[in-house]
Image: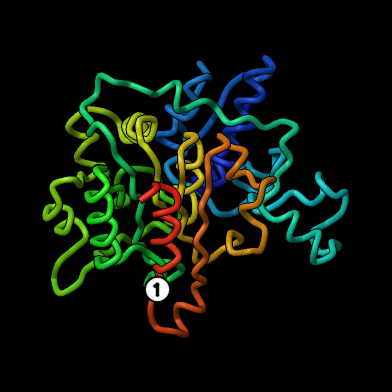
Amino acid sequence: MVIDVNPEFGYEIGCSIPYAYWLHKNNQLEGVVTSKGMRPFYYFCDNVEEKYEHRSIDNLNNGVQNLPNTWIHHNAAANFGKDYGELTEEEQTKANGWLDYSQWECPPYGEEYFDESINLPDNYIVISNRYNLEHGELPVGYFDIECLNEMFNYFRSIGLSVIYKRPTNVEFIRDPNELLNLNIELNGLTDFDLTQKHSNVFIMDEVIRYNNLSYNEGQLKIFSRASGFISMGGGSSILCSCFGVPVVIYVNTSGDIRPGYFDENSYFRKLSNAPIYPTIDEKEKIKQRGYRDYKELYQNIRKAFNG
């Protein structure tokens, strides 16, 4: 079978790649057609065509419709034998985040890409942030300057470095929600400026360039040696959950805010059995109160990293 997809990054990590790897393990994978730059994620396949110049959010036409899991937020039909809308409230809570795992296995990226030869800090956390124009609106949920400063200081206090991932959206093929990257600023200080004020913090793009790696090979190698992750919700948090180390996720919107989404049947937990610490701070509540509430985020960071 040939997998031919160009969906959002999260769908590819959560729905496409585990199916492709399952096919590979069962000698049924003939090839993969995917977006530019994605070959490292399909390292197990010799026949990978990086065809697509863009990602599509149209899940009826981007290849997702041909996968066992066509919707990343649940697979009620497979697990309950009926549509999500027919489930009771209790069943919906159980269904949220639960995919069909009968033809689904995450590749062992941590084993494949662990590389002691590249120049990285001895012990580090990856903080994965984003700040994009979202559906024509300025972003509401993200790690702002004060939050980043708090996290950078905390990890220095417990002897950990930080590799800061905040793409400028030229590193990879984008979907329609990633078309315009913006600056995170406070009093003229950007998040990239802030990293220069902390000797324990390194910008991921610079680490990748220093080690002369492609973007996706670089982040897979960096992630494979990380002690844990702090991530915004979405595709990046799904990738962070593939490496078997603690992941603290700050979630503001999408299906991820549904009750039960990160429970034991969630694909977040099935990817690598990583400890997952979700922090829900809904977009609409942020708008109502006028600020992001990071209290639970900080509590989860301390739980995850024993500070």
Q: Is residue 72 above or below residue 30?
A: below
Residue at point 44% right, 46% down?
A: 54
- Residue under numbered circle 1: 292
The image quadrant of residue 218 is: top left
Please state if 186 lies on the left or on the right of 288 as rendered: left
Residue at point 24% right, 24% down?
A: 118
Q: Residue furthest front?
A: 307
Q: Quick one: 13 or 163, which is closer to the camera?
A: 163
Q: Using a 10 Å C-alpha cutoff, classify the residue at mark 1 as few (fewer than 14 neighbours), some (14 to 19) or many (20 or more).
A: some
* Residue 232 percent location from the top left of the image: 43, 56
The image quadrant of residue 134 is: bottom left
Q: Is residue 94 above or below residue 144?
A: above
Callout 1 secondary element: loop
Residue at point 57% right, 63% down?
A: 254
Residue at point 62% right, 38% down?
A: 270
Please state if 173 lies on the left or on the right of 171 as rendered: right
Q: Is residue 286 above or below residue 267?
A: below
Name the amino acid type tagged 1.
Arg
* Residue 159 percent location from the top left of the image: 24, 43
Please state if 38 lies on the left or on the right of 218 as rendered: right
* Residue 56 percent location from the top left of the image: 52, 50
* Residue 93 percent location from the top left of the image: 73, 60
